[in-house]
Amino acid sequence: MAQDPFIKPFFDEYGNPKWPEETPDWAGGPEGEKDFFEALRNAWIVSSDYRQRMLVAENGGPDEWRILLHDENEMVRAAVAMVGDGPCHQALAQDASPLVREYVARFGARESLMDMAGTEQENEVILSLARRKIPAVAHILVEKNWDRPEVLFAIMPYVGNSDREKLMAHSDPKVRCRVGAC
């Protein structure tokens, strides 16, 4: 299959789909680049192979992202969260999948993260939010998770001094000890 010159640009050596690095000669070469990649995005955005839709997300733009925001596959939505813009992050911040929200936490804009910090319940996503070390986000995380010492314990290294001072008044001695250790 990979030896066919018409198929070879679309697959890596393991048979996985890949985004072509350049426009093949049979597709018009450099002169046909714009049309080739537009046709490729249009074909793969409706592909049954989620890996091709992920590649569209990674190599597309706002128009493709808006369509793929609602994809049934969480890996495709995670790819959008990784490369998307602010409106995409806002939309995916409340996604049902913790994996997608984790990608928003890692790659999202400050405004999306602040919204997430007030509602997020998954410990791993909360930790990813804290790791961004945005003071306003950390402050919200401390307030919203005050009754969850295990979460406070985990995010402690990533919160600012004002939040650490506030945590010195926490009722759980482990949290207070962790503040001292940080």
Image (tube, helix red, strand yellow):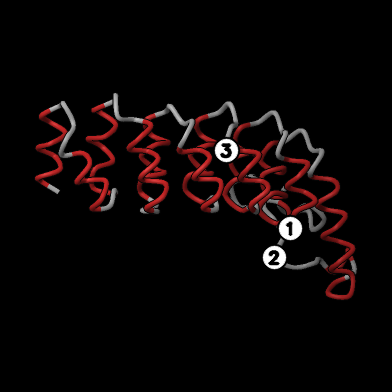
Residue 13 point in image, percent of width and height: 60, 52
Which numbered mark, 3 or 1, is in the foreground of this view? 3
* Relative height, residue 22 to residue 114 (above, below): below
Q: Earlier in the sequence, mark 3 or mark 1?
A: 1
**Marks 2 and 3, how far apart at CA:** 32 Å
Is mark 3 in CB contact (under 8 Å) with mark 1? Answer: no
Disc 3 is placed on an element classified as loop
* Relative height, residue 3 to residue 94 (above, below): below
Is mark 1 in CB contact (under 8 Å) with mark 2? Answer: yes
Q: Amino acid at mark 1?
A: Pro
Few, some or many C-alpha atoms within 10 Å of disc 1 (few <14, some 14-19, many ≥20)?
some
**Marks 3 and 1, how far apart at CA:** 35 Å
Q: Is residue 17 visible?
A: no
Residue beneath disc 3: 93
Residue 41 point in image, percent of width and height: 81, 51
Residue beneath disc 2: 21
